[in-house]
Image (tube, rainbow, N blue to C red):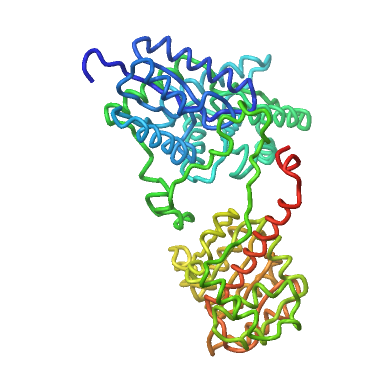
Amino acid sequence: MTGGDKFGIVIAGHGSRDPDAVREFEALVELIKQRAPHDVVTHGYLEFATPTIGEAVTANLAAGAKQVAMVPGVLLAARHAKNDMPAEMQAAARDYPEIDFHFGAPMSLDPKLLQLAQERIVAAEAQSPNTVRRSDTCLVVVGRGTTDPDANGEVAKLARMLEEGLGFGAAYVCYSGTASPLVADGLRSAARLGYARVVVLPFFLFDGVLVKRIYAATEDLAEREPGVEVLKAGYLGVHPLMADVMIERAREAVAGRAAMNCSLCKYRVQIVGFEQQVGEPQQAHHLAVRALSAKPDQPVVAEPQYKTYVPHPIEAESFRIIAEGRDWAPFPPEQLTILQRLVHTSGDFDAVNDMYFSPGAVDSGIRALLRCKRILTDVTMVQTGLKRALLEELGIDTWCGVHDRETHLMSEQYGITRSAAGIRRGWEKFGNDVVVSIGDAPTAIAEATRLIRDHGWRPQLVIGLPVGFVGTRETKEDLRRCLQVPRITNRGTRGGSPWAASVVNGLMIDALNGLAAEQAAVPRDDVAG
């Protein structure tokens, strides 16, 4: 910048339906303006509130800024700081190519935030007429909870640093959502540790729906545990230390010193249990609720608009031939999409003669895909065969652990195949809320039926269609007799990963067509309201 150029800071907030949260965020922005009087400071929100981040950028440039630092006004680097806010900055850079944009680090475990947490804890202790040693006190730190283990781990690190730095007898960590333990469970566990006092510290920037829930759960704990003194510490809130950290983040961004947590970022390196997400596209997910408060006539959550599945013309011609190629009347109508796709995959009209569907299997599979939105496969080839467009439109995730390090370790330690170990890991990770599709390994079917019979696993649907001559017939027959779960399989040696993928594709097509038909039957006013 030249000496006359203005420096711009855009504070990018999350946004909230709670007006208290929005009010406090804007109070912090005013404090930042006071402490950085020579800079252009504007603010915007990802979701629910206005102005949007794009509008904040426009306002900043209109005030004369020639270089802009976007600072995430969120705690820790999870999806919002890694995906959504960078997407907003990229959009701004495309719209204003003549402007230098810089992205700041989010609010991490800065020494100033530790000092602020200390202030909140001391203030909470001062509310009590009792004198209790810190060594007789358990500190409970409540984080937001995300799908990112790095961000969740930072909350645990904060708790440990406060425990040792302030001399607490113990520290316990819980989360308001997504991660476990949840608040109520964490508070109960902390109360049972035997300490005379429990101090609950919400590791949140501002008030809002979640903080109010945390305080309500804290009050419930105090009523249930009269023998334990329970104190509510304040969240971080509006404070000069907070303002200074955000200003520092902006300065660091422009200087190229923004310290991101890339060394443990699940999108960049293989983190135990999250290996599948290395290199995953980092896409914004907030667009449906951007500036929602400015649209009172809109629903709280935007209603997805589903369209009937339209095949490629060559695919459509193939299915016309298949529909006319044999008599389909003996087959139940709900099975036809799957059966005809199996003919399309195998090139053999007789492939459907050996298929077995347990009663209600198709309906169970469709409902599971729409509710659980997760498919577990034995090999990556099944994953590859699933139609990407359908997965994205229905919001369905897939998981296959066959190549993960932990799967290899389990395979070696337990003396089982990697496919079987992958199924066991899927059972541990996802429990019952999953559709299982097996297309390669008879040992994967054997492991699934063992877990179902011996350990009470109840996946929503098991598709077992491996190909081969060793153990294939036997494991398929065992799956057919496994009455505890809905299942789709066949008799004999034929099958394979494309077959297993075709069954899931058929289920997804019927699911999408069903949603589109339901929406078409509902008047537009009802859908909008």
> With 196 as the anchor, is 256 left or right in this view?
left
Q: Residue at x 44, y 57 (%)?
A: 275
**Furthest-left residue in view?**
2
> With 179 as the anchor, is 277 left or right in this view?
left
In the image, residue 509 above or below residue 1: below
Q: Quadrant of residue 32?
A: top left
**Where does the image place residue 229, in percent across and percent down from the top left?**
70, 25
Residue 92 vs residue 474, the one in the foreground: 92
> With 222 as the anchor, is 161 left or right in this view?
left
**Where does the image place residue 27, in percent across and percent down from the top left?**
53, 14
Q: Quadrant of the N terminus?
A: top left
Residue 248 vs residue 383, the one in the foreground: 383
Residue 396 vs residue 343, the one in the foreground: 343
Q: Quadrant of the C terminus?
A: top right
Q: Residue at x 76, y 77 (%)?
A: 332
**Where does the image place residue 164, in percent across and percent down from the top left?**
48, 31
In the image, residue 50 above or below residue 336: above
Q: How many marks?
A: 0
**Where does the image place residue 241, in percent across and percent down from the top left?**
44, 17
> With 40 as the anchor, is 324 left or right in this view?
right
Q: Quadrant of residue 356?
A: bottom right
Residue 342 vs residue 305, the one in the foreground: 305
